[in-house]
Image (cartoon, rainbow, N blue to C red):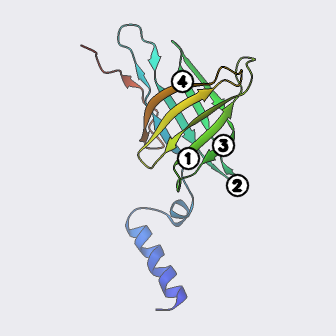
């Protein structure tokens, strides 16, 4: 089968599956979210991280809870390496010095390992596991009840 025959076959397979050639060729925004609402207070709990692809590489925005839902904050110096699983980004918030967040990323989840506030205090360990969601899933369900 020649080069154009392979392209035609691939196009037909994508169309038969209900997809489009443009959708198959363009990377999608990856969304990871552990956000939930406390049924008693209504406050949010957890994190939501979006990683939309850009022409310059990777972009990242993050929302988190501190009682009310905070953000989204846009990160800079984003490293999201699927090969090594390394995740690192820098945030600037509320007049504080920039701080670095480190963790691991996979197709299934992000694990936030530490925040370093840049104030000489050293990293604050986290261990937060944030599962991957579909890109169009913005839902925030109820938090699991604790016994």
Q: Earlier in the sequence, mark 3 or mark 4?
A: 4
Residue corresponding to mark 2: 55
Q: Is residue 107 above or below residue 43?
A: below
- Closer to us: mark 2 or mark 1? 1
Contact? badges 3 and 2 (CB < 8 Å): no
Marked residue nearer the N-terminal end (3 or 2): 2
Q: Quadrant of residue 142?
A: top left
Alpha carbon distance from label 1 to label 4:
20 Å
| Mark drawn on residue 86 | 1
Measure the C-alpha gap from mark 3 to mark 2: 14 Å
Q: Position of residue 134 (x, y in %)?
A: 43, 44
For label 3, the residue is 78
Of the two numbered discs 3 and 1 in the rendering, the one whose residue sits closer to the viewer: 1
Residue at the left extreme of this rendering: 147
SS for dot 2: loop
Q: Residues within 10 Å of mark 2 (few under 14, many from 20)?
A: few
Is 135 located above or below residue 40 in the figure? below
């Amino acid at each position: 089968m020649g080069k154009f025959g392979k392209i035609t076959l691939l196009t037909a397979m994508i169309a038969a599956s209900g997809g489009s050639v443009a959708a198959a060729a363009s990377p999608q925004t990856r969304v990871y979210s552990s956000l939930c609402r406390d049924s008693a207070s209504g406050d949010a709990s957890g994190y939501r991280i979006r990683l939309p692809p850009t022409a310059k590489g990777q972009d990242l925005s993050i929302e988190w809870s501190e009682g009310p839902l905070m953000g989204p904050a846009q990160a800079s110096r984003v490293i999201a390496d699927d090969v090594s699983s390394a995740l690192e980004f820098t945030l600037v918030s509320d007049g504080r010095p920039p701080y670095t967040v480190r963790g691991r990323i996979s197709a299934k989840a992000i694990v936030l390992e530490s925040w370093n506030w840049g104030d000489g205090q050293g990293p604050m360990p986290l261990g937060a596991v944030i599962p991957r969601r579909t890109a169009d899933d913005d839902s925030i369900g109820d938090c699991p009840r604790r016994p």
